[in-house]
Image: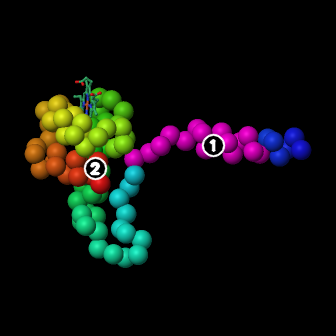
Amino acid sequence: MKKVLFIVGIIFLSIVGCKPSLYIPKNEPDGKENVIPIEELKQGRSLYVHRCSGCHNLHLPNEYTAAEWKVNLDDMQHKAKINDDQKALILQFLLH
Ligand code: HEC
Protein backbone atom coordinates (compact mmCIF):
# COMPACT_ATOMS: atom_id res chain seq x y z
CA MET A 1 0.00 0.00 0.00
CA LYS A 2 2.80 2.39 0.90
CA LYS A 3 4.46 1.58 -2.38
CA VAL A 4 1.33 2.52 -4.32
CA LEU A 5 1.09 5.85 -2.52
CA PHE A 6 4.75 6.48 -3.27
CA ILE A 7 4.23 5.83 -6.98
CA VAL A 8 1.09 7.97 -7.08
CA GLY A 9 3.06 10.74 -5.35
CA ILE A 10 5.86 10.57 -7.89
CA ILE A 11 3.40 10.75 -10.79
CA PHE A 12 1.61 13.68 -9.18
CA LEU A 13 4.85 15.57 -8.61
CA SER A 14 6.09 14.98 -12.12
CA ILE A 15 2.86 16.40 -13.52
CA VAL A 16 2.79 19.42 -11.20
CA GLY A 17 6.52 19.98 -11.58
CA CYS A 18 6.32 20.39 -15.34
CA LYS A 19 6.29 23.95 -16.52
CA PRO A 20 3.99 24.66 -19.42
CA SER A 21 6.13 25.05 -22.50
CA LEU A 22 5.87 26.97 -25.69
CA TYR A 23 3.97 24.98 -28.31
CA ILE A 24 5.73 23.71 -31.41
CA PRO A 25 3.80 24.29 -34.65
CA LYS A 26 2.64 21.07 -36.25
CA ASN A 27 0.74 20.19 -39.40
CA GLU A 28 -2.95 19.53 -39.01
CA PRO A 29 -3.33 15.87 -37.96
CA ASP A 30 -5.66 14.91 -40.81
CA GLY A 31 -3.23 16.15 -43.43
CA LYS A 32 -5.29 19.25 -44.18
CA GLU A 33 -3.44 22.29 -45.45
CA ASN A 34 -2.60 24.71 -42.68
CA VAL A 35 -4.17 28.12 -43.10
CA ILE A 36 -0.84 29.66 -42.14
CA PRO A 37 2.16 27.93 -43.72
CA ILE A 38 3.93 25.78 -41.14
CA GLU A 39 7.29 27.26 -42.15
CA GLU A 40 6.12 30.75 -41.20
CA LEU A 41 4.98 29.54 -37.78
CA LYS A 42 8.29 27.79 -37.22
CA GLN A 43 10.17 30.92 -38.24
CA GLY A 44 8.04 32.94 -35.86
CA ARG A 45 8.72 30.53 -33.01
CA SER A 46 12.43 30.52 -33.70
CA LEU A 47 12.58 34.33 -33.79
CA TYR A 48 10.57 34.53 -30.60
CA VAL A 49 12.78 32.03 -28.75
CA HIS A 50 16.05 33.56 -29.95
CA ARG A 51 15.27 37.26 -29.91
CA CYS A 52 12.95 37.54 -26.93
CA SER A 53 14.58 35.40 -24.26
CA GLY A 54 17.78 37.35 -23.71
CA CYS A 55 16.50 39.73 -21.02
CA HIS A 56 13.59 37.88 -19.41
CA ASN A 57 11.82 34.53 -19.47
CA LEU A 58 9.55 33.98 -22.44
CA HIS A 59 5.91 34.83 -21.85
CA LEU A 60 3.47 32.18 -22.98
CA PRO A 61 1.06 33.12 -25.77
CA ASN A 62 -2.00 32.85 -23.50
CA GLU A 63 -0.64 35.37 -20.98
CA TYR A 64 -1.84 38.27 -23.11
CA THR A 65 -4.70 39.09 -25.44
CA ALA A 66 -4.06 39.78 -29.11
CA ALA A 67 -4.27 43.52 -28.50
CA GLU A 68 -1.84 43.32 -25.59
CA TRP A 69 0.63 41.29 -27.65
CA LYS A 70 0.60 43.94 -30.38
CA VAL A 71 1.44 46.64 -27.82
CA ASN A 72 4.08 44.46 -26.13
CA LEU A 73 5.73 43.66 -29.45
CA ASP A 74 5.80 47.32 -30.45
CA ASP A 75 7.42 48.11 -27.08
CA MET A 76 9.97 45.32 -27.43
CA GLN A 77 10.79 45.75 -31.11
CA HIS A 78 13.71 48.10 -30.60
CA LYS A 79 14.97 46.12 -27.60
CA ALA A 80 15.02 42.90 -29.63
CA LYS A 81 16.33 44.69 -32.74
CA ILE A 82 13.83 43.05 -35.07
CA ASN A 83 12.34 44.50 -38.25
CA ASP A 84 8.64 44.79 -39.06
CA ASP A 85 8.57 41.48 -40.97
CA GLN A 86 10.14 39.63 -38.07
CA LYS A 87 7.72 41.28 -35.67
CA ALA A 88 4.79 40.16 -37.84
CA LEU A 89 6.09 36.56 -37.89
CA ILE A 90 6.41 36.51 -34.09
CA LEU A 91 2.93 37.95 -33.67
CA GLN A 92 1.48 35.40 -36.09
CA PHE A 93 3.09 32.58 -34.10
CA LEU A 94 1.91 33.95 -30.75
CA LEU A 95 -1.67 34.45 -31.89
CA HIS A 96 -1.98 31.20 -33.84
C1 HEC B 1 17.08 44.13 -24.33
C2 HEC B 1 16.23 43.40 -23.40
C3 HEC B 1 14.88 42.85 -23.89
C4 HEC B 1 14.61 42.10 -25.01
C5 HEC B 1 15.58 41.62 -26.09
C6 HEC B 1 13.18 41.83 -24.98
N1 HEC B 1 12.61 42.36 -23.85
FE1 HEC B 1 10.68 42.16 -23.26
N2 HEC B 1 11.06 43.28 -21.60
C7 HEC B 1 12.28 43.85 -21.27
C8 HEC B 1 12.14 44.63 -20.04
C9 HEC B 1 13.25 45.42 -19.36
C10 HEC B 1 10.78 44.49 -19.64
C11 HEC B 1 10.07 45.07 -18.41
C12 HEC B 1 9.91 46.54 -18.49
C13 HEC B 1 9.10 47.01 -19.66
O1 HEC B 1 7.91 46.66 -19.78
O2 HEC B 1 9.69 47.75 -20.49
C14 HEC B 1 10.14 43.63 -20.64
C15 HEC B 1 8.82 43.25 -20.58
C16 HEC B 1 8.19 42.42 -21.49
C17 HEC B 1 6.82 41.98 -21.41
C18 HEC B 1 5.85 42.29 -20.27
C19 HEC B 1 5.14 43.57 -20.54
C20 HEC B 1 4.10 43.84 -19.47
O3 HEC B 1 3.26 44.70 -19.73
O4 HEC B 1 4.13 43.21 -18.42
C21 HEC B 1 6.57 41.23 -22.51
C22 HEC B 1 5.28 40.53 -22.89
C23 HEC B 1 7.77 41.22 -23.31
N3 HEC B 1 8.76 41.93 -22.66
C24 HEC B 1 7.89 40.59 -24.53
C25 HEC B 1 9.05 40.60 -25.29
C26 HEC B 1 9.12 40.10 -26.65
C27 HEC B 1 7.97 39.48 -27.42
C28 HEC B 1 10.41 40.26 -27.06
C29 HEC B 1 11.00 39.92 -28.43
C30 HEC B 1 10.44 40.62 -29.56
C31 HEC B 1 11.16 40.87 -25.97
N4 HEC B 1 10.28 41.06 -24.93
C32 HEC B 1 12.51 41.14 -25.98
C33 HEC B 1 13.46 43.69 -21.97
C34 HEC B 1 13.62 43.01 -23.16
Q: Where is residue 36 in the image (x, y as percent from the top left)?
A: 24, 63
* Membership of 11 in magenta stretch: yes
- Provide the residue designation for mark 1: 14
Image side of residue 88 versus residue 61, left or right: left
> Is the C-beta of the residue carrying label 1 under 8 Å from the nearest atom of ligand 1?
no
Instruction: Name the residue at 60% across, 39% down.
Output: 16
Instruction: Name the residue at 12% across, 50% down.
Output: 85
Number of marks in picture:
2
Residue 53 appearing in the image: yes
- Provide the residue designation for mark 2: 95
Q: Residue furthest bottom?
A: 31
Q: In this view, does 72 lie above or below 32?
A: above
Q: Residue furthest left?
A: 84
Please report the bounds of the magenta region as a residue range. 7-22
Instruction: Name the residue at 75% across, 45% down.
Output: 8
Q: Position of residue 77 (x, y in %)?
A: 15, 36
The amino acid beneath tag 2 is: Leu
Q: Is residue 37 above or below residue 77?
A: below
Image side of residue 4 versus residue 25, left or right: right
In the picture, the quarter occupied by the C terminus is: bottom left
Q: Quadrant of residue 1?
A: top right
Q: Where is residue 46 in the image (x, y as percent from the top left)?
A: 28, 50
Looking at the picture, tell me which residue is in the foreground, 91 or 58.
Answer: 91
Q: Position of residue 61 (x, y in %)?
A: 34, 44
Residue 46 appearing in the image: no
Q: Dot 1, crowdedness within 10 Å: few (<14), some or many (≥20)?
A: few
